[in-house]
Amino acid sequence: MSTILSPGDVKLRDGRSVDFANLDIAATAPCLRAVADAVAELLPFYGSVHRGAGALSERCTREYEQARETVADFVGCRDGDTVVFTRNTTDALNLLARAVPEGTTVLTFDGEHHANLLPWQQSLHLDAPRSPQEAVELLEWALRRQPCGLVSVTAASNVTGEVWPVAALAEVAHRYGARLAVDAAQLAPHAPVDLTALGADYVAFSGHKLYAPFGAGVLAGRADWLDAAEPYLAGGGASASVGDDLDVRWATGPARHEAGTPNLLGAVAIAAACRALAAADHSAERALVARLRAGLARLPHVEELRLFEADAERVGIVSFAVLGEDPGALATTLGRDHGIGVRTGLFCAHPLTRRLLSEATARIAPSAPVPPQAVRASFGLGTTEAHIDRLLEALRR
Ligand code: PMP
């Protein structure tokens, strides 16, 4: 497995140096060396994609389209699927929201990340389920009452790390004539997200959570709605020809939604990450999740956030309420005194996180004030047992 680029040691307030424990990988993951190498290799050949002749432009166009094919393989594209490069997951889901045919009813669950909630404000929202099984039952119940064209769900929660039953949801959606879109921002870095295997219709994810740099993301899936939709952005690249009176014939294929000069290095970086992750072994991460959760359970003032049952499958994301501490001050102390980076807040899933904070507080101290924010530790490739133990020890103190 390709190694991770690390920031090296950081200096603590007491003068000691420690290797930085980056436990905020769910926000943005560090870069894989293979990704950095792929980008560095291409830099001398920097040229325009799909615009211009000459060796540089030809090479860049070829690399860009090869990156698209690599991503298509990574997400298990079928005949009739396409891959559109976007800026990130938010952009990808907004693009899909624009491409949904007029009059289509869209259904989501409460508790989604805002990126999979706010583009669908006009849609039907089901209550957040309390188990994967309940998600499937709720969906079936809803689709029996109300025909829908699209169901959009998370594959793994950015708040709890819980994995949603995407294949079962896709099966139910299809039985009722709906398509299923998957927000895989948090699953893709930890497990395969294969449209063919899952039976899902669309998948969206971000390069910067997939051990690649910022600035590029992916929407992959059924091409027909995208091909028929108005271009996401109007401009060069999305237009095949423009008449003297500005009548436009829009491009077909992914170019239709990739107006402007494409982010070649972002696409190449994502492709390199896809190649590296296709060979990744995530079993160590599962052991780290168990280690952290067991350690947190031993701390009397700390309670994890969960929507599903305690034994539900999770990726490397564990959020928790810390009673009697200011979350911001705690995060600062973790950073300055222990060399640990975590995230505090409501994690762009405000209603869900507030609710889970209340429930977590009620489980361990029903009369205690509910903390205004949660603390999230998230990890993946490059995280060690020592990082987890350092966090637990710091919280214990
Ligand atoms: N969905 C989920 C589940 C996420 O965790 C995130 C990022 N926190 C997003 C969508 C949005 O990703 P981006 O900010 O890269 O668009």
Image (cartoon, grey):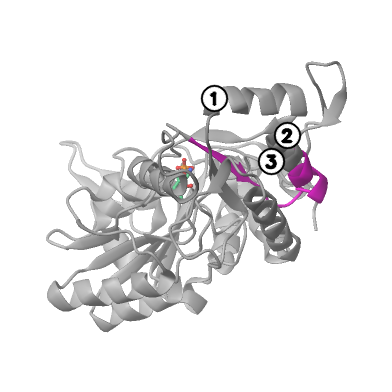
Q: How would you rate the neighbour count of disc 3 (Cα within 10 Å): few for under 14, some for 14-19, many for 20 or more?
A: many
Q: Which numbered tag is attached to residue 30?
A: 3
* Residue 157, above or below 279: above
Mark 3 secondary-structure assignment: loop
Q: Earlier in the sequence, mark 2 or mark 1?
A: 1
Q: Quadrant of residue 275?
A: bottom right
Report the side of 227 relative to 314 (left or right): left
* Tag in front: 3 or 2: 2
Q: Amino acid at mark 3?
A: Pro
Residue on which disc 2 sits: 394
Q: Earlier in the sequence, mark 1 or mark 3?
A: 3
Q: Which residues are magenta?
A: 374-390
Q: Position of residue 313 (x, y in %)?
A: 56, 67
Q: Residue furthest front?
A: 367
Q: Amino acid at mark 2?
A: Ala
Mark 1 secondary-structure assignment: helix
* Tag in front: 1 or 3: 1
